[in-house]
Image (cartoon, grey):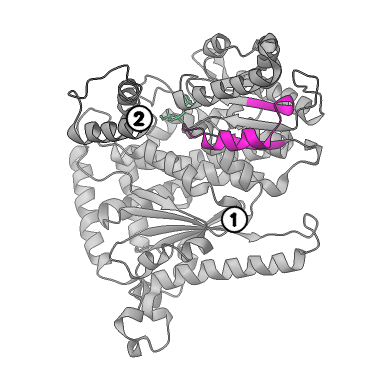
Amino acid sequence: MTDAKDRQWDELLAHGATVAEQHIADLFAQDPERFNKMHRQFGPLLYDFSKQRMTDETVRMLVDLAETHGLRDWISRLFAGDEVNCTEGRAAMHWALRLPIDATCNVDGADVTGQVHEQLARMERIVAKIHAGQWRGATGEVITDVINIGVGGSDLGPLMATEALSDFTTRTKGKVNIHFASTIDGSQLSQLLRETKPQTTLFVISSKSFTTIDTLTNAATAVQWLQRSFGRRASSSILHCHFIGVSASPQKMTEWGIAEENQLGFWGWVGGRYSLWSAIGLPIALQVGMQSFRQLLAGAHAMDEHFRTAPWKDNLPVLMGMIGVWNTNVLDVNALSILPYDGRLKQLPLYLEQLEMESNGKSVKRDGTPVTRSTCPIIWGDVGPNAQHAFYQLLHQGTEAVTCDFIVPVRRYDEAMHHDAAEELAAQHQLSLANCLAQSRLLALGDAALKDAEQMPLYQRYRGNQSSSTLLLDELNPYSLGMLIALYEHKVFVQSVIWEINPFDQWGVEMGKKIAMSTLAKIRGEDVSLDDTDASSAGLLRRIKAEWKS
Ligand code: F6P
């Protein structure tokens, strides 16, 4: 098999060398049918990869490469609940969180669907109670503000989806405002504590492990804030009335003081960055209601089924993953920019940064040996039209090869949903769509998209040949968002299979946390020695302490 793999890589690299000689403008000029051949539609999602630097033949070769790398077997293992997360000895079953209630899923004798839907039902009861104004604070006042305290996957997913679905805010929500606090320095929390009232604020402590110092520190500050307002006598009612916990560790939630009836659980087999579909998604459900939250799950489930069963030449996650492999390993394009042309998706680039880079930012293979090819590219992005006024200069005229994902809904500002300015806002959306299409065209074609480009000075020319894919959504709604996110999750999995790495662990983030604790002892003067640290850190520590003394 290794020989077959090596041979295929050699063939792919040779093919890459010939493709790389051609400009995307030439590829379009050669084949008027290019778009027809190089886009796929699944439900409300259209994936256009015709602006990638590749040909029909490339697609065929990439599908073969996936076959040789055992992708078929890995997909079966993922959906069978095998221990695909080898360094932590567990399954990765985020897909099971979106199974419909009548699906059968038994893993190691446990009825997974039953457990998942039991937690969803618990979540639904909590959402209903808060929306109905029946969740009261320690003084009997109705809760009006919910602050989600969490970080990483316990923050980015709910934050991204809550903003993305802001137009779908449920009418039954009453006057509940949803906020997020994640930063360890307390900057978001301090602002929120100024804006909210202790009597009417409920905190959701979201942490898979319930040991993350960032989250526990913010949570401890929240407790102190409430105690200062209510007095210590109210300690137990403070915890009972003002804190919900969401975690895979009920024991740790209990030790912290979360009442059993305020605990929502999930499981070790859900990775943090794959957890928005679980009770970690409580803020999303509070924003859009349970019905829409279930639509989000349904959209993701449809993508799961598509990934599991669609032929690979039409399979969106397989194509997207393999095109990423092509860019990274054949064309040496090691940067991916995520560019949504919809302000509601402002948080999507941040969310995908964690999903992709924490999953596939690895350099050791599953078999314990170092990788020999590049893995995850550097990913960043912003709302496209804003980024046009910030970093597009580099995309158009810089020296680096970057590939882009343009994401845009076709329909927006449905009259039924919108107010007095519906017509003007619809026109703004058209402007956004036009910008999206114009930018991807210019990036791909360069001067060929312009008239008389040769007359212009070099500094006004566009070299083009910057590849991109466009994801066109019929509209951004809970169902299509679920599909979109699941698409990226499975794309990451496909790439991990080709790169032979484990996408479900994150050992690289552990040591920094430990060093931070020993550094904290030095900052606080509990450890006065600076000899055991490097000269830069020692110098900075001295300066910090000198500043505090002055
Ligand atoms: O430090 C990285 C990480 O473990 C992420 O993988 C995770 O999403 C985040 O921290 C938060 O972890 P937890 O949900 O356990 O608080």
Q: Is mark 1 within 8 Å of ligand 1?
A: no
How far apart marks 2 and 1 lie (CA) works out to 45 Å
**Residue 102 visible to an observer of this rendering:** no
338 or 533, nearer to the observer? 533
Q: Would you name the residue on which mark 2 appears?
A: 549
Which stretch appears magenta? 177-203
Three-letter amino acid code at disc 1?
Answer: Gly
Q: Is residue 518 left or right of residue 421?
A: left
Q: Which mark is residue 343?
A: 1
**Residue 358 visible to an observer of this rendering:** yes
Give residue 155's position: percent from left, percent from top: 53, 34
Q: What's the residue at 50%, 40% (across, down)?
A: 309
Circle 2 sits in a helix, a strand or a loop, which is it? helix
Q: What's the residue at 61%, 70% (across, down)?
A: 431
Q: Is residue 76 left or right of residue 132?
A: left
Q: Quadrant of the C terminus?
A: top left
Magenta segment: does it hold 164? no
Give residue 528's position: percent from left, percent from top: 26, 19
Give residue 542's position: percent from left, percent from top: 26, 31
253 or 491, nearer to the observer? 253
Mark 1, other Cα within 10 Å: few <14 / some 14–19 / many ≥20: some
313 or 474, nearer to the observer? 474
